[in-house]
Amino acid sequence: MSTRKSKAPETGKAARRGAKGLRQFLDAGQQRRWLDGQAEPRDADQRPDSPELRFKYLPRYQKLMRQPQAQDVRGILRLYGRTCLPIPRRTERYYWSVSCLPSTSDKPLTRVNASWMELFSLYADGDGLRARFLVHLSDFTAERSSAQNLVDEELLEGCVAAPEDLGYFFPRSDDLLGIYVRGATSICKFLASGPVLRAIRAFNLTHMNRGRNAYQASHCYSLADHMLDD
């Protein structure tokens, strides 16, 4: 466990004068290659850490780890961190964060955010899990339309273990699709499906490029340890 004092990550060779968000670290070409699965950009060897935040959320983390879903939560977060976030060590907390048992009305077990946007949430479903993903609607419609009646349901249903594990809704925003997936098996299959993974990456890039993460103060380093295999 690192005990270094928290500080903003330093920019690297890809930094651009006046750039914000992820563009400070990865240029457009590097982001595109990661999005398409053609390259894995080099990440930082070490992570910034905040002992104050780590200990602040340790009781919540310990409470979550006593829940029957704990093992699946750890595994799914590890998969999400490894595949859905670019250079996650370098951008941890400042450009994405994970919260543990956040105090919101929908009562998630955990939630990943970037900028001002929710990216991914896990909820208790009995003793199992239910996930909620936010993606661009146009990534799941014909000809990249934003028409809600053109959602490719066949594609989505093919990305889960059983059609009944899938549901979707339309948040109050243009080109936004919310997707529910029930059960750890279906959630893992969903995250491993090529079209879905690309859509998740595209949405995450959009919001990580918008600037600093607004949820830095709720970052749970103990959960992030699982996402980053620490």
Image: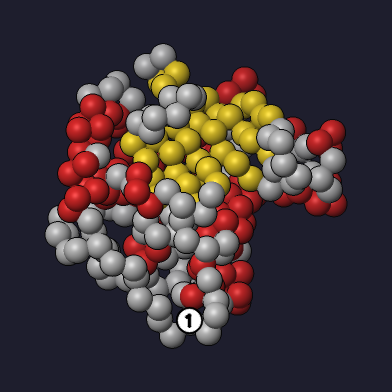
**In this picture, is 89 found above or below 105?**
below
Is 87 above or below relative to 65?
Answer: below
Among all residues in the image, which is located at the extreme top? 126
Determine the residue positioned at 81% across, 51% down.
144
Note whether residue 97 is visible: yes
> What is the count of numbered marks?
1
To which quarter of the image does residue 190 belong? top right
Question: Could you tell me which quadrant the C terminus lies in?
Answer: bottom left
Q: Is residue 193 left or right of residue 230?
A: right
Q: Tell me where residue 209 appears, x and y as whole percent.
A: 56, 64
Q: Residue 117 at what x, y percent from top left?
A: 55, 47
Horizontal side, residue 68 vs residue 34: left or right: left
Q: Which residue corresponds to mark 1?
A: 15
Q: Residue at x 45, y 18 (%)?
A: 125
Q: Nearer the viewer, residue 114 or 150?
A: 114
**Quadrant in which residue 156 is drawn:** top right
| Classed neighbour count for the residue bearing mark 1: other residues with Cα under 10 Å, few (<14), some (14–19), many (≥20) | some
Going by the numbered disc 1, the residue's amino acid type is Ala
Q: Position of residue 180 (x, y in %)?
A: 58, 29
Color style of the picture: secondary structure
Instruction: Tell me what residue is drawn at x 60 percent, y 41 percent.
Output: 134
Location of residue 147 with respect to 167 vertically, above or below: below
What secondary structure is marked by label 1? loop
From the viewer's side, name the closer residue of 15 and 7: 7
**Residue 67 in the image: x percent, y percent?**
28, 22
Above/below status of 191 relative to 50: above
For the N terminus, give its image quadrant.
bottom left
Say whether residue 73 is visible: no
Residue at the (55%, 76%) spot, across then down: 19
